[in-house]
Image (cartoon, grey):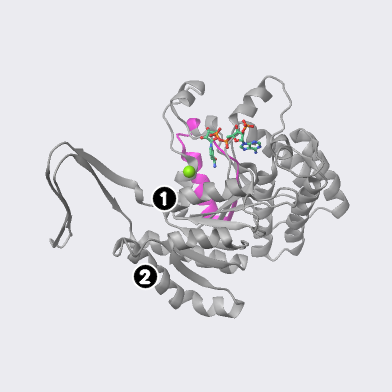
Amino acid sequence: MKIKMTTPLVEMDGDEMTRIIWKEIKEQLILPFVDLKTEYYDLGLVKRDATNDQITIDSANATKKYGVAVKCATITPNKQRMSEYNLKQMWKSPNGTIRSILDGTVFRAPILIDSIKPAVRNWKKPITIARHAYGDVYKSVDLKTEEPGVAELVFTGESGRVQKVTVQKMNGAGVLQGAHNLDSSIKSFAHACFKFALDSNQDLWFSTKDTIAKVYDGNFKQIFEDIYNEYYKAEFEKKGLTYFYTLIDDAVARVIRSEGGYIWACKNYDGDVMSDMVSTAFGSLAMMTSVLVSPDGKYEYEAAHGTVTKHYYRWQKGEKTSTNPMATIFAWSGALKKRGELDGLCDLVSFGDKLEQASLQTLNDGIMTKDLTALADCKTTEVTTEEFIAEIRKRLEKLM
Ligand code: NAP
Ligand code: MG
């Protein structure tokens, strides 16, 4: 008897090597065990082009409706892709489109195994980075001046009220930048972080540089504090969890000295930089999971890596590849577990756990794809993607 589902998962298919892996995971690891219900959206570049990207918007709206999605990596088109796929337009990044519709925050966490030691010796548990995905330098304007002069920051309110500060009296050539953020976006970010911390039973850290950017970063700090006190403090205390604010430089020092096991919320730029630092120090991009959480509690699970184009070009020539499917498997298991949790389906939750267990067992037995054999400090056997998935299947069958 296969495991039953009641509500469909929103399934977002993707491109290149990850699209091949996607099909393999479904056929080998999920369909034999679960009576899978999905609402299928093909976000492969061909279909996005054919629908003028409407399919991406539809898939995000379906996520709003059903609450849980699982996404395959997708190509973000550039000039070279325009000719490769003969595109009508250089379509925007699907992740960006989905993120703006769900107003979500991205949480990234590494998958840990015993034989791959983090570069930071005392890290024992995953560190999850929550990156604010709106504004600051990513939506800023710059200019360069060649002569002395005065730079001013002017805000004209709809009411007609004007606020003005001098940025700098410049005595020569130089550069200027204007950045902004919105309270509504910072509030959404804060809610998503507090909710995710409660959901995953982890402490939440938040860091900015409010001693220097007193008004700008001070606003972030204050909004987090207010939202914590008003909505989440009681529940954090009940669960024995901590919300902890500190300066970004102090946070960096503490993170390195810590043993992990918490969520680190970062402003947009800090999150960009720190997530690459943390994922590299944990070992491999192929072992990073990612989940987009909206402030009203909708979830979209995916791998943190891209479509692994170089491997795909080799696969197209008929070569076997050793591409690591772990992060994509964990996107599926995460989504199935969340669906099970929301629908009260214990069997589905337990299946997600077993799928993760079987995958980790395979790695712990030294059976690995090429990216990991180089990192592991145990005896390893390098396998192709297909062989790796078949090994997981064997272990999963035993667990079922
Ligand atoms: P990538 O697909 O993440 O791959 C970069 C390199 O990292 C690969 O060439 C491979 O190194 C290694 N790698 C990544 N994932 C791996 C895995 N699962 N197993 C083994 N090795 C892995 O990044 P990219 O080449 O910069 O981007 C390719 C396409 O993906 C682009 O079109 C980009 O737009 C898209 N992308 C999508 C997303 C998303 O949908 N979330 C995110 C990022 C990029 P070796 O070649 O050395 O083996
Ligand atoms: Mg980056």
Relative horizontal placement of residue 162, taking residue 369 as reference (left or right): left
Return the residue nearer the eye: 144 or 267: 144
Task: Answer with the quarter of the image where residue 42 lies.
Answer: top right
Q: Between residues 267 and 359, which one lies in front from this camera angle?
A: 267
- Residue 363 horizontal/vertical position (percent): 77, 46
**Amino acid type at image mark 2:** Gln
Q: Position of residue 305 (x, y in %)?
A: 58, 41
Disc 2 target residue: 222
**Quadrant location of the C terminus?**
bottom right
Can you tell me which quadrant of the image ligand 1 is in? top right
In this view, the residue in front, 84 or 247, is 247
Q: Is residue 3 visible?
A: yes
Q: Is residue 189 visible?
A: no
- Among the two numbered marks 2 and 1 on one chain, the one whose residue lies closer to the N terminus: 2
Give SS at disc 2: helix
The amino acid marked with disc number 1 is Tyr
**Residue in view at x 80 percent, y 46 percent:** 362
> Residue at image x 51%, y 24%?
85
Is 36 drawn above or below residue 349 in the view shown? above
In the drawing, does residue 173 fall left or right of residue 272? left
* x then y, percent, for residue 343: 66, 63
Horizontal and vertical percent position of residue 398? 88, 51
- For the record, the magenta segment spans 49-74
Count every numbered label the image shows and give the total.
2
Mark 2 within 8 Å of ligand 2, using the beta carbon? no
* Residue 269 image label: 1
- Name the residue at 68% across, 25% down: 315
Query: Disc 2 and disc 1: Cα gap in Å?
Result: 19 Å
Quadrant position of residue 162: bottom left
